[in-house]
């Protein structure tokens, strides 16, 4: 078993995040869905055993990845999903990142630019703003609610990835290719059920690695 707590494994962390997100985005998914992933099991910063993807190596066709169109790119559900997926990867390896250090926004922007036509820093500022509103609002407005549902969908899909050879649910892919309202309704029902059973809490959905990052520290 390899230990993840080394800087040299940051590429493996990024590759895993790119793999998980590439599976979710139409035009990219088709390129790797038939690839059987080569998985490394290693220890997370919390001491749990997690999966990291060795192959396919997304870096090899990183420049060829299909980016989101402007409408989907600005969708709060999509932003919440992508942000939470990155957040989970960093949290699993947080001992490689220094609190308030530039490594966290660098990792976010490095991945965001692979799926966004617009500037990655602009997207990151959007993520931080949505995350702030999600934390502060008692009764979330529709945009903030979509952001939180996207975060929950990413968390749910990641847990599926950890417990299965392949993610058994691809919430973002279905959202981007199917009926958005139906997908969001089903996710909201699942989230409410877990809240009622005390299986999840609001702070589980925060983009926690960005709590110490603000707009000024990005410049």
Image (cartoon, grey):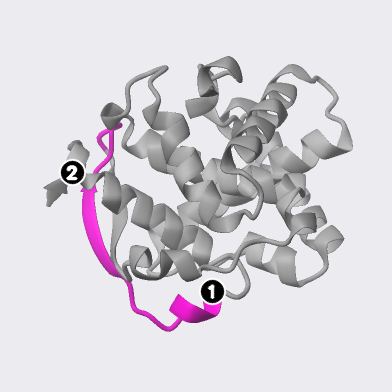
Residue at 31% x, 55% y: name it: 51
Task: Return the residue at label 2.
Answer: 8
> Residue 62's x, y, as percent?
43, 64
Residue at 44% x, 77% y: name it: 32
Quarter of the figure with residue 6: top left
Foreground residue, 199 or 126? 126
Residue at 45% x, 45% y: name it: 110
Q: CA distance from mark 1 to mark 2?
A: 27 Å
Q: What secondary structure is found at the residue carrying circle 2? A: helix
- The answer to whether residue 137 is left or right of residue 16 is right
Task: Return the residue at label 1.
Answer: 29
Foreground residue, 40 or 96? 96
User: Is residue 7 at least partly visible in the picture?
Assistant: yes
> Residue 164's x, y, as percent?
40, 65
Are the two marked residues, 1 and 2, in contact with CB atoms closer than 8 angstroms? no
User: Is residue 197 at least partly visible in the picture?
Assistant: no
Dot 1 crowding, Cα within 10 Å, few <14, some 14–19, many 20+: some
Q: What secondary structure is found at the residue carrying circle 1? A: helix
Dot 2 crowding, Cα within 10 Å, few <14, some 14–19, many 20+: few
Question: Exactly how many numbered labels are in the figure?
Answer: 2
Residue at 40% x, 34% y: name it: 91
Residue 42 versus residue 174 in the image, above or below: above
- The answer to whether residue 145 is left or right of residue 88 is right
Foreground residue, 109 or 205? 109
Q: In the image as oriented, which residue stretches furthest toward the left?
A: 1
């Amino acid at each position: 078993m390899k230990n993840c707590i080394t800087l040299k494994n940051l590429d493996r962390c990024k590759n895993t995040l790119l793999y998980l997100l590439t599976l979710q985005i139409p035009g990219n998914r088709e390129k790797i869905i038939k690839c059987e992933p080569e998985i490394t099991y290693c220890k997370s910063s919390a001491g749990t055993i997690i999966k990291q993807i060795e192959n396919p190596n997304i870096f090899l066709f990183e420049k060829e990845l299909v980016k989101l169109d402007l409408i989907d790119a600005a969708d709060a559900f999509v932003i919440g999903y992508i942000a939470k997926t990155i957040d989970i990867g960093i949290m699993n390896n947080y001992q490689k990142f220094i609190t308030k250090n530039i490594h966290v926004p660098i990792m976010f922007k490095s991945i965001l630019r692979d799926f966004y036509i617009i500037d990655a820093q602009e997207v990151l500022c959007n993520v931080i703003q949505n995350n702030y509103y999600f934390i502060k609002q008692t009764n979330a407005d529709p945009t903030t609610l979509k952001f939180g549902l996207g975060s929950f969908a990413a968390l749910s899909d990641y847990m599926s990835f950890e417990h299965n050879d392949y993610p058994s649910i691809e919430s973002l892919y279905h959202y981007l290719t199917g009926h958005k309202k139906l997908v969001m309704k089903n996710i909201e029902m699942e989230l409410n059920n877990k809240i009622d059973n005390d299986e999840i809490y609001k702070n589980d959905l925060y983009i926690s690695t960005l709590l110490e990052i603000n707009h000024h520290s990005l410049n």
